[in-house]
Image (cartoon, rainbow, N blue to C red):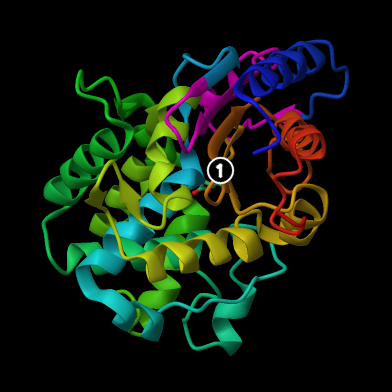
Amino acid sequence: DAIGTIEIAGIVADIAAEMGAAAERGTVASYIPPLAQVPPEKFGIAVVMADGAVHVAGDADEAFSIQSISKVFSLTLALGAVGDQLWQRVGREPSGSAFNSIVQLESEQGIPRNPFINAGAIVVCDVLLGRSAPAEAIAQMVRFVRTLAGDEAGSIGIDEAVASAEQDTGFRNMALANYMRAFGNIRAPVERVLGVYFHFCALAMSCRELAMAGRYLMNGGRVGGHSVITANRARRINALMMSCGHYDNSGDFAFRVGLPGKSGVGGGILCVAPGIASIAVWSPGLNASGNSQLGTLALERLVQRTGWSVFEPR
Ligand code: GLN
């Protein structure tokens, strides 16, 4: 590898310094108070290399609301639970619409376009509820993410203030779930499915923890000799992150960054350079599609300086 460890450490530090000075920071999500109160100056980055080296800068150890990034982990659990049957209930095409859009559900018979828009992730929660009660599904998710991140101290958890604010304001998500229920694509009671969905959105993690949790996606489904998911499924999750991970901005993210990535309205992005690195960035200001403005810029600079895009020759 032409890029040495020391060089990566320097690149990560430079990017954090540049983002600290950036003027155009986007707009912090305002739909719930716990997100609206997050200071827009925050920026963190963590890069976990395939050899285990970790490089962090900025606010990389501060927990934030991972929101829709949890859709990657819930998809992984659902594929483990029901395998490819999942694809009978959720598609694999980019939506070209906002994360919380309802329009395609009418013409497509209640089958969401992909597991990374809200409707698709709500179906994934319903699939997990086919096997367990809500409290168990939530506890299983917390255990799973802690294990992925190697979080033995159990510092990763659910921010209950975020979960209850999601519940209080989640009218569009309720509409999506009820609409899909009318097509038979939600089977458990809607309140239970959404309770699970809102708790998953409320997972709080730092960039360091998130990048650690994403290691299985850079390693063909394996972490430290242990198989989390098959290599085939890890590859497909990466493909979905590339094509659908940034909603109607997914094409632009592929154009600028060229790596599988999943964003959340808390301002985080989990990004995977297969075989090379698992990367997490966080800056709470969002662009018009609800993706982190500086998080995307930071990743764009990282791939420009490292050549890590999957579209560049190795
Ligand atoms: N909690 C948000 C919602 O369900 C998550 C959306 C996101 O991160 N894009 O609307």
**Residue 72, how many percent across, how many down?**
43, 53
Residue 22 colored magenta? no
Where in the figure is residue 208, as x and y percent of width and height?
A: 46, 23
Q: Residues within 10 Å of mark 1 (few under 14, many from 20)?
A: some
Q: Is residue 190 visible?
A: no
Which quadrant of the rendered structure holds the N terminus? top right
Which residue corresponds to the image point at 17% horizontal and 69% vertical from the top-left?
130
In the displayed image of the protein, which residue is found farthest to the front? 2
Name the quadrant containing residue 167.
Answer: top left
Q: Position of residue 296 (x, y in %)?
A: 74, 38
Q: Where in the figure is residue 272, as x and y percent of width and height?
A: 56, 47
Residue at the spot x=26%, y=25% of the render?
A: 151
Task: Judge whether residue 151 can be spotted in this image.
Answer: yes
Quick check: is the Cβ at mark 1 less than 8 Å away from ligand 1? no
Residue at the disc numbered 1: 276
**Is residue 52 shown above or below 310?**
above
Q: Is residue 81 left or right of residue 277?
A: left
Which image quadrant for residue 214? top left
Foreground of the two, 138 or 174? 138
Residues shaded magenta: 27-54
Q: Is residue 48 found left or right of 156 in the rendered image? A: right
